[in-house]
Image (cartoon, grey):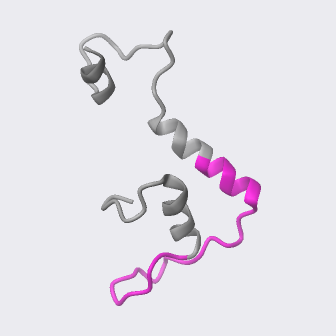
Amino acid sequence: MHDDTFPPVKDALGHYMEGGSLNPRLEKEIHALDFLSFGEREDILAFLDSLTAPLPDNLRPPTGLTTKQTAQNG
């Protein structure tokens, strides 16, 4: 989550699958995603993990683009 309440992506996904935390500010449109199969949940998790995975060695960002990863690799 954006505030590190659930550092692993899997825990954050589980939180949202259950509909989030009930509170007075919770949007009425937000509801549990309990209709998703376990396979669909694993697919979502794999997609989310792919967004933060390191780039393969044979793939580089465009020249002149600074990213967290390229800044660390120098």
- Taking the magenta stretch, the answer to whether it contains residue 23 is yes
In the picture shown, does residue 49 fall above or below 8? above
Q: Which residues are magenta?
A: 19-45
In the picture shown, does residue 72 fall above or below 57? below
Residue drawn at (57%, 66%), measured in percent from left and top? 14
Residue 26, by quadrant, is bottom left
Q: Position of residue 9 (x, y in %)?
A: 49, 53
Image check: 60 left or right of 16? left
Q: Position of residue 16 (x, y in %)?
A: 52, 68
Image check: 13 left or right of 61? right
Q: Position of residue 11 (x, y in %)?
A: 52, 61
Quarter that holds the N terminus:
bottom left
Residue drawn at (30%, 62%), measured in percent from left and top? 3
Q: Position of residue 29 (x, y in %)?
A: 49, 78
Residue drawn at (45%, 27%), measured in percent from left and top? 54
Residue 38, by quadrant, is bottom right
Q: Main secondary structure of the magenta part?
A: loop
Residue drawn at (44%, 86%), measured in percent from left and top? 22
In the picture shown, does residue 25 fall above or below 13? below
